[in-house]
Amino acid sequence: MDLKRYFLEFSYSGAAYHGWQRQPNAISVQEVMEEALKVLTKADCALTAAGRTDTGVHARKMVAHFDTHFPITASNQWVYRMNQFLPKDIAIHNIRTVKTEAHARFDATSRTYEYHLTQSKTPFKLGISYAIYQPLDFDAMNQAAKVLLDYEDFECFSKSNTDVKTYLCTISRAEWLPILDGHVFTITANRFLRNMVRAIVGTLIEIGLGKKNIQDMHQIIQSKNRSLAGYSVPAEGLFLTEINYPNSIYIDNG
């Protein structure tokens, strides 16, 4: 059987995991999924994901690719079987055949994150939303969020001492919208830096609290200084929700 490349689409709750990437002394989503793949394909299968989520961050849609000689014909049946080998907090949704050079990380054209915020105490949001009880000016927060679309260098929101070649990102959407029991911040870009979304949300919250203003957002971004930006909000409210790819990478009809 020829070696083929596949894209897996899946979701997970990050609460029980130390992020996506394998860790030497902690459980990760990647490790659990690769072990399930090994059982099914009867061979080691390395997963390469579209990105790395940190400890406690959730994914409504994540994509990873892998190569295998194992024949995968009926995708629905294969998805069902793999889900039987995975815990309840990880779910496979689809598998698609792609070109051998297709790459889950480098071929992604955009990614979308959501950050969920609640301003009332509710047990049903526990672990999936950040609770903040002070009044927030969401109009000011949205005006400040629009500023992000005017820039490309976001070093000020990147985690310090990370090995990155460029801090350039193209943000196409950044806005707060009301939802039941709270608000959600949605941000879309071609790529994201480590801890970038959580630092942006923390900065916007400080603007919403009146600790910073909209002009400060310009100065923070221009400074390229992480210490001038806001605090990093907790991981529990953060969800990776969408990853887009060009149709040209797929061999099947999806």
Image (spheres, helix red, strand yellow):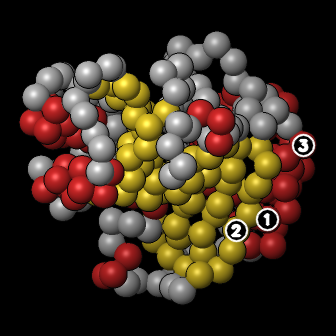
Please tell me the numbered disc located at residue 142: 1
Q: Give the secondary structure at mark 2.
A: strand
Q: Residue sitting at 51 percent across and 52 percent down?
A: 254
**Quarter of the view holding residue 114:** bottom right
Q: CA distance from mark 1 to mark 3?
A: 14 Å
Q: Which residue is mark 3?
A: 150
233 to the left or right of 230:
left
- Lower position in the chain sequence, tag 2 or tag 1: 1
- What type is the residue that disc 1 sits on? Asn
x then y, percent, for residue 223: 80, 28
- What type is the residue that disc 2 sits on? Trp
Q: Which residue is mark 2?
A: 176
Quick check: marks 2 and 1 in contact, CB under 8 Å? yes
Q: Is residue 248 above or below residue 111?
A: above
x then y, percent, for residue 74: 29, 51
- Lower position in the chain sequence, tag 1 or tag 3: 1
